Amino acid sequence: MTVTAITTSEITSATTTLDFTLSGATAAYDEILLTWTGVKGGVDEKHLGFQVVTSGGTHDRPIQSAAHSEWHYAHDYSKGQHYDAARDKAHDATYKFHALTEGGDTHKSYSATNGQIRFFKHSDTDFYTFFQINSNVFEAHLSDFQQITFNWKCAGYVRDTAALTSFRFQYITYNGNLTGAGDIAKGTFSLYGIS
């Protein structure tokens, strides 16, 4: 397996969206990997999300998925895991953005999210494009005593047999809506090809 760095974008001032092109030379890779590090949103308790564009030329491709969450507070205040049924994504005609992370309290200087999403055979036009997400959020709720880390895992597929041509990062609300979700305040985003 060979992992090739394609491009990196560092956000240092607020931006609403960040797009990566998946067509052209990127289409030749068997898999693509997008990562994010040290990302903060401009509004508390919102979620970094994504949507894709296909060769049909449109955003808002519907997604089907299932998720699992684990958490651990400092001082063993609380910890656990659960099947995240509330974050399942069915074929949805209303909110096409999908979450990449749990929400984060951005008022703490140390709060941030990092993670990755991996697409398999994103240029194949015979089947749906499957993906896996693994992300982490470190934050505090009301005080530094309540520091907590979330690990969030998700698997799913894009319900479209057209090839993926673009990927968009954007902050969203809990259910995938954009109203009041805010901007990407800062962070580093990278695209890799895997062959």
Image: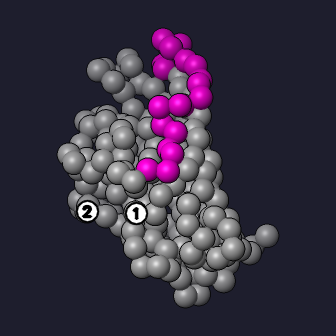
For label 2, the SS is: loop
Q: Residue furthest right?
A: 1
Q: Which residue is mark 1?
A: 60
Is residue 50 shown above or below 149?
below
**In this orientation, which residue lies closer to the viewer: 51 or 146?**
51
Q: Earlier in the sequence, mark 1 or mark 2?
A: 2
Q: State yes or no: residue 87 in magenta.
A: yes
Q: Position of residue 31 (x, y in %)?
A: 67, 69
Q: Amino acid at mark 1?
A: Asp
Residue under numbered circle 2: 15
Query: What span is in magenta?
Result: 73-92
Q: Quadrant of the C terminus?
A: bottom right
Q: Nearer the viewer, mark 1 or mark 2?
A: 1
Residue 50 x/y as whole percent? 43, 57
Q: Choose between 75 and 190: the one closer to the eye.
A: 190
Of residues 5 and 83, which is closer to you in this image? 83
Judge whether 12 appears above or below 68 on screen.
Answer: below
Question: In terms of image quadrants, where is residue 193?
Answer: bottom right
The residue type indicated by label 2 comes to: Thr
